[in-house]
Image: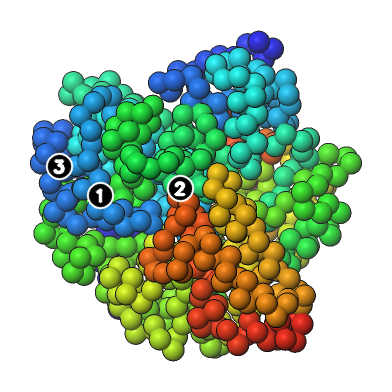
Amino acid sequence: MSHPQVLTARMTEHPTDSHTLERYEVTGGYAHARRAMDMSRDEIVELVKASGLLGRGGAAFSAGLKWSFLAPSRPSYLVVNGDESEPGTFKDRQLLERDPHQMIEGIIIASVANEVHEAFIYIRGEYPKPARRVQQAVEEAYAAGYLGKGVFGSDYDLDVTVHLGGGAYICGEETALINSLEGKRGEPRIKPPYFPAAKGLYMMPTIVNNVETISNLPHILEMGSDDYRALGHADDCGTFLFSVSGHVTDPGNYELPHGITWRELIFDVAGGIRDDRALKAWIPGGASAPWFVPEHHLDLEITKEACGKAGSMLGSGAVVVMDETTCVVKAAERVVRFFAHESCGQCTPCREGTTWLEMILRRIEDGSGRPIDAELLLDVSDNISPGLTWPPKQTTICPLGPSAVSPITSVARFFKDELMQHIEQGGCPLG
Amino acid sequence: MTWPPDVQERAKELIGRYPDPKSAVMPLLYLAMRQDGYLTEAGMREVAGWTGHSPAQVQSVATFYGMFKTEPLGKYLVSVCTSISCMLLGGDAVLSAVEDETGVPHGETDAEGLFSVEHVECLGACGGAPAVQVNYELVEGSTPDQVRALCRWLTGERPDAVNTDDMQDRFGGRRSFDWAITETDGAIGPFPAFGPYGTVGEADG
């Protein structure tokens, strides 16, 4: 089974030097940013809208539409979100380390489209090697005259600064990221305004795009919107980077079109389950996503719509696979612990709720669960996300709190017996 | 201003990268960690002076982010990922091995100031789980025995700088993705090694 590679083609064909300016240019790099310099803002925005490119950070919002919300006041800013921290996700790390110029070319295109002269690349603090690579590439681009004063010999100036985060998942939320860049605590801002394109960095119009989203831009200019759309499936255009981890034989990042099935992804692409064990469940789109199980979801098509209808999402593209030896209570505890740890603490339902969910799950796993605990888990969850619906409702400023509810509702829906066994037997039935 | 002239120059250069000096607080906090090994009260006051934040604001920022440490740290900060993907593939056993070999439990530093140990949330190395970092330099796919050997190597050799590719070669296993080039830039303390922040050293390799 062969699928077209777009974002990962260069790093696959040139594994030793795909990160260098020399290799990037030999393989056609920066031609499309040069062309963008002669295009109008409207032309580029319309092209990206028509390409159907959806944001790759997890929210899957139309990138072109986001750009079209840019308010008229200036200066405007571009922030590339490289704060990749959703458990299971490691795709941006590969793009940053192995093809940084692809992203920088995307930054030039996005900057021209949004009249930006100052861009920031926010990379999570735990990614020093990717940050060193990107810094090296930025310096190469400056030296070549592709960044800085007079980009490509034009009268357009563009400065790019690499900024390291400090180890806070919440800074992936775009308004928290902006606060962090302003030198504040990384706490999400109260909405409205819903889009930083209206009021963002220093309260000026700001575009925040994920690393993978930005890296797609040179290819959209190269292919045109029709050919780019044709790579994908119906409304899910282009290719998509899946980070597959857990109990599969061949974990890794895979660039695939939408529309294949979960069976194909887990068993054909990722080599199936290790040691010929049985598949028990998988997280289809990062820790925030409700889980899927083989009885119901293996032959489901991987599209935004199909996953949404089935009660989950593709999110950040992180697929975490669990085999039959996995204790679902322990797995849920780890996911909930993450959100409890990363809650910024502004909103009571999230700050208190995630902490209580973690404590209850831990006591159930440790054998001290009480008969009421299964019900209590859902009750606390309902306070964070009323009605436990999908997509979730929220009582909080940002979606972090409701994300912590996903593993709880997944266990309640598919593994109620295993949860009750923990409580009744005073410990984990899997030993 | 108490920083040496070269650090002051670097602070000025970093501040110049942002439209507002306040935005440079995180880079300058890393600079302060580089000076003192962790964030001291004096270091945070220095950052306040440079950025125009009040000292209380600097402290409020510093304590929000997990990588800014306001307690003394060891020469090597060993961070073990026990998030979902690493947990599924033995991250908890790797943590136990690190704690046992160093004698340092999660969140603590030894009396000698050699090791600090912590378990952390997802490091973005899920394809090479379980993941460990030493001073934020990544080692993927290690067994408990391999991380024990890593800790013994750090104790015996006491390298001034540690580098991800070097440690991966010596003590690692499966990686999230392959990387053919070996670099020698390394971390010189319990903070990320990044050129503009002046925190990079040369690993022996």
Work out whether disc 3 and disc 2 sit on a shared chain. Answer: yes
Horizontal and vertical percent for residue A4? Answer: 25, 66
Question: Relative to A279, is B100 on the left or the right?
Answer: right
Q: Give B65 or A29, whichever is nearer the viewer.
A: B65
Helix or strand or loop: what does disc 2 sit on?
loop
Under mark 3, the amino acid is: Ile
Q: Which residue is denoted by mark 3 in the rendering?
A: A44
Q: Give B197 or A300, whichever is nearer the viewer.
A: A300
Work out whether disc 1 and disc 2 sit on a shared chain. Answer: yes
Under mark 1, the amino acid is: Ala
Q: Which residue is denoted by mark 1 in the rendering?
A: A63
Task: Give the letter of the chain under mark 3.
Answer: A
Q: Residue furthest right?
A: B111
**How far is the residue under mark 1 from the one under mark 2?**
22 Å
Q: Quadrant of residue A139?
A: top left
Question: Relative to A379, is B15 on the left or the right?
Answer: left
Label whose residue precedes the other's in the sequence (3 or 2): 3
Task: Give the letter of the chain under mark 1.
Answer: A
* Mark 3 residue crowding within 10 angstroms, few (<14) / some (14–19) / many (20+): many
Q: Residue at x 31, y 57 (%)?
A: A60
Horizontal and vertical percent for residue A41? Answer: 14, 36
Labelled disc at residue A397: 2
Instruction: Work out whether B29 lies above or below A320.
Output: above
